[in-house]
Amino acid sequence: MPKKSSRIIRQSPNTQDDIRRAELDIARRARAAFDALSIEEAQKYLSRLSLQQAQTLRYNWQFNARASQIIPFGPWTYWVVLAGRGFGKTRTGAEAVRYWARHHNNVNIAGPTQGDVRDIMVEGESGILAVCPPNERPRYNSSQAKLIWPNGGKSLLLSAEEPDRFRGKQHEKLWADELASWRNTDAWDQMVLGLRLGHRPQAVVTTTPRPTKLIRSLVENPNAIVTRGTSYDNRANLASAFYDAVVRMYENTRLGRQELNGEILTDNPNALFSPLDIDAGRITHDTFMAKRDSMVKIVVAIDPAASSNENSDETGIVAVATDGNDYYVLEDWSGIYTPRQWAERAIALAEYVGADVIVGEGNNGGEMVEYTLQTVNRDFPVRLVRASRGKAIRAEPASAAYEQHRVHHVGSLPKLEDQMTLWNPSGSDGSPDRLDALVWALTECGLGYFDTTGIIRYTQQLAAESKTPQRSAAENAIEAMRMQANGR
C-alpha cells in the first residue's frame, strides 16, 4: 500500500503526465499478463497474495480500469464522458477526483442535486468513499458539504439546484456529474468562470447525453476531449437484474440509443417537438423572475395515472405561466404516485408557483380527480378537462408554438424534454404523461384558442388544390371557431 501522504504532491502538468504514462504502462502490461491466464491459473495467483497485496490490487485503478476510463493526457480543459447507463461513469469521475486530490488543493465536485452528490458521487457504491483505500479516504463533512483529504486538500460539494453557491468558488480540478440533467445551467456557467486555479485547470464531465445546447457546445469545444461509451462496454460488471430490467427494456428503441449507447439524438423526424426549438426558447430562472409580475395566468395541470405500482404510467404534473403572448414552462413534478400523493404534489406545486387553478384530465375517473384534490385542499380552484381528440392532435398547437419560439422552458426539464422529443405519435409505446400534462397546461393558459392562422392557411390550400367551388378562408375559419367553442 502507498504510504499516507501528509502533503500535496506538487508537480508540473508535464511531469505528472510522464509519471502517469510510466505507471499506466506497467499496470497495463500486468493486466494483459493476468488476462492471459486461465481461470484456474488466475485463481491460483490471487490465492497467493497477502491481504495487503490483494487490497493494493483492488484499489489499483490503472490495473482495473478500461482504457476509456483513464484520464486523458495532454492540455485539455474538459474531458466529456458521454456514455450509457451502467458504463461506469460514476467510477470514472470518482477515480479522477482521487488522483487529482493527491496533487491539488481545490478539487471540487458538483451534481444535479445535493442528494445526488451525497448518495451517488460521495457515498455511492462507485463513489469517492468507496474507491479510495483507507489511507487515501477523505473525511466527509456533511454539515459543511465538503470532503477533507488526508493531505489537507479540500473538495467542495456543490449542487446545481443552488447556482448562487458557485459564485466566487475557484477550482483547480472539477468533477461535474450528469450535466445533461442539471436544471440550472447557470450553475455550469458560474463553475466555468471559477475554473482558473493552477497550471492546468480541468473538469471531467460524466453524463448520459441529451441533446441540450450545453452538451452540444461542450462536444464541439476545441478544448474538450470526448469519450463515448455504451452500457455494453461494462457488461461483465453489470448485475443480471440491471441488465434484464434496463438494458433489455431499452434495446432496439430510440430511447435506448441515448440511454444505452450514449448517442446524442439531435432530431427525431417523427416527433412533434425538436430539441433545437426547445433550446431556442429556453430562459434562465432569473430571466423569468424579472418577468414574473407580467404573468396573467399560472396553471398546474395533472394527468393522473390509473395505478401506482412500480410498472405504472407516471402521473404528469406540470406548471405553466403566460403573459398573454408567450408561455413559460416552470416546473415538472411528474412521477409514479398514489392518488393521495399526486394530489399533495399538485397542490404543493400550485402553491409554490402561485397558480390560479389546477386542471385535471377527467377522462379517467374525473370525479375522483376532483375529489382527491379537494381532500388535500378544498379551497383551491380545480377544473376538469376532457379529451375529445387524440394526443397528437391535441399537441399540434403546442408544437407550432414551440416552432415559433413562443414557449420558454425555465431552466432544464430533462425528463419532460426527453418525452417531448422522443415520443413518436404514430409508433411510440406507453403514455406520454408529462407531455399530456404540459399540453393541458398550455391549453388552459390560452394556447390554441381561436388561433385562426393555421385554419386560414389550411383552407386556402384546400381551395387552391380543389376544382370545386369553396367557401372563403375567412368563412371556414369562422365555422371552425364556432365548432371549437361548442366543443365539437
Image (cartoon, helix red, strand yellow):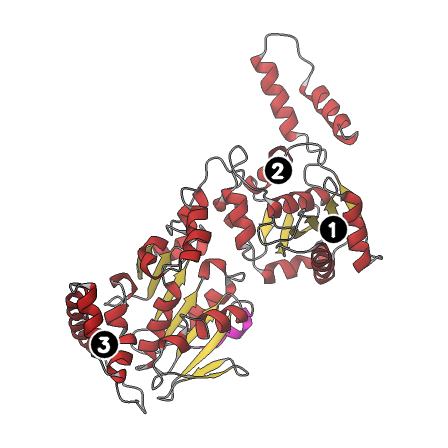
Q: Position of residue 340 (x, y in %)?
A: 73, 57
User: Could you give the CA–CA distance between mark 1 and mark 2, rounded to whole angstroms?
Assistant: 20 Å
Q: Which residue: 46% across, 53% down?
A: 245
- Nearer to me, 173 or 24: 24
Left or right: 333 as drawn, with respect to 159: right
Q: Report the quarter where the C terminus lies.
A: top right
> Residue 69 bears which disc, if any?
none
Say what amino acid the circle numbered 1 marks. Lys
Please determine whether, in this image, residue 465 is positioned above or below residue 454: above
Say what amino acid the circle numbered 2 marks. Ala
Say what amino acid the circle numbered 3 marks. Ser
User: Could you give the CA–CA distance between mark 3 and mark 1, rounded to whole angstroms?
Assistant: 70 Å
Along the polypeptide, which appears first: circle 1 or circle 2?
Answer: 1
Identity of the residue furthest to the top in this view: 468
- Asked if the magenta segment contains residue 192, the reply would be no
Q: Report the quarter where the N terminus lies.
A: bottom left
Q: Mark 1 packing: few (<14 Cα in 10 Å), some, or many (20+)? A: some
Q: Tag 2's secondary structure?
A: helix
Image quadrant where residue 335 sits? bottom right
Q: Nearer the viewer, mark 3 or mark 1?
A: 3
Query: Which span of residues is magenta-colored?
Result: 162-169
Q: Position of residue 7 (x, y in %)?
A: 31, 90
Task: Kindly identify which residue carries mark 3.
Answer: 47
Q: Which residue: 66% across, 49% down?
A: 307
Left or right: 194 as drawn, with respect to 133: right
Q: Which residue: 54% across, 60% down?
A: 183
Q: Position of residue 63 (x, y in %)?
A: 23, 71
Q: Residues at badges 1 and 2 in contact (C-beta under 8 Å)? A: no
> Residue 395 bears which disc, if any?
2
Q: Tag 3's secondary structure?
A: helix
Along the polypeptide, which appears first: circle 2 or circle 3?
Answer: 3
